[in-house]
Image (tube, rainbow, N blue to C red):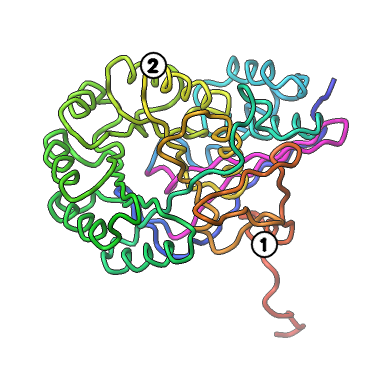
Amino acid sequence: MATLSHSDTFIVDVPTIRPHVLAMATMHGQSMVIVRLTDTDGIEGIGEGTTIGGLSYGEESPESIKLAIDTYIIPVLEACDLAQVGATMAKVAECVRGNHFAKCAIETALLDMAGKRLGIPTSELIGGGRVRDSLPVAWTLASGDTARDIGEGEEMLDRRRHRIFKLKIGKRAVRDDVAHVGAICKALGDRASVRVDVNQNWSEAQAKIGMAMLHDVGCDLVEQPIAGDAIAAMARLSKGQVVPLMADEALNGPRSAMRIASAGGAGVFALKIAQSGGLFATAQVAAIGMAAGIGLYGGTMLEGGVGTVASAHVFATLPELAWGTELFGPLLQVEDILREPLGYGDFSLAVPTGPGLGIAFDEDKLAHFRRDRKAPALHAVTAGA
């Protein structure tokens, strides 16, 4: 029986390389909750719980994720056999309601431990195992400045790093946003796929106009244009518009996926391990989507290296992934907290092949960005000063 020997939960705050403008917030950094679990056999598992903009995106924040883990989930783990990941997470679900991001961080750490214990990648513990070793990766153009976004897109194409681009819109008037998107579509032409994310910021009437106009300027996909709980309206838009509607905030696990699929509320699912409540739940959401003929896209909460790799292990098991992924989170941060940076190149991300998640921390960088680190003295204090 593998029981919990030690746990550590802490927040790291890493600045971003540029402001990242979303409909609900502008990010200048990312705060990630890191979980480290060690069992009595000395095997360590790592996990990450990351959201966007504190509480501006959803109901969990870095602070609440840490509190939920330390106060409510860790005591549950102390009574479990950590080698039995499914049974352990079932016990956590029985004792803790909601808190998908916190549960995802814990499940990630448990699956990392399980993979290390068995000497296999985490992806081999999900579904039928991995079917691909690399994933196409999109880049989000979110400065809000058209010329700057075009320049950034051109640079990514020249470097062969990304040829799928998502634009964050919804803050400006619909026609102004469409003009912004249209200019980028025209500049990048058939060298790239351009999609948009409205982050629920339009009404149904605005979405009806905006989606039609976006199709006309060459946009390939519109992500969550209206409120995530407006499934009937999403169905009307999906039926009435040519450009596909992708569900994102509307998805928070298999049950929501079933409701959306039954209503015809989306043409594409954005898969996110944190929103779904873990890697296993994400695989279930994907299965519902595939069964319903809904396209799949590997989404992101702009996680750092741990959450990105955990997502990649799930997405690597999917036989259908027509819309690619958006696993660029670590590239948005000024520093990578992993010992070896992830393998981005030729428009793709290589999925690690080592045991568990196949990654390790750079302990110095991790210590530097910890929120609870002790700040070094700026100067010596002398007597009588």
**Left of 182 or right of it: where is 66?**
right
**Residue depicted at 17% across the width and 36% down the height:** 203
In the displayed structure, 13 sits above or below 204; it is below
- In this view, the residue in front, 247 or 195, is 195
Instruction: Tell me the tag on residue 368.
Output: 1
Main SS of the magenta part reads strand
The local crowd at label 2, few if under 14, some if 14 to 19, many if 20 or more residues have their Cα within 10 Å, is some
- Residue under the point 63% across and 59% down: 369
Residue 206 falls left or right of residue 77: left
Name the amino acid type tagged 1: His
Could you say which is closer to the camera, residue 369 or residue 332? 332
Q: Identify the residue shown where x is 50% and y is 51%.
A: 328
Residue type at numbered disc 2: Met
The percent position of residue 260, horizontal first and vertical second, equals: 33, 20
Q: Which residue is mark 2?
A: 258
Please report contact status of discs 2 and 1: CB closer than 8 Å, yes or no. Answer: no
Q: Which percent across, then down, holds residue 148? A: 32, 68
Image position, residue 4 (x, y; %): 79, 29
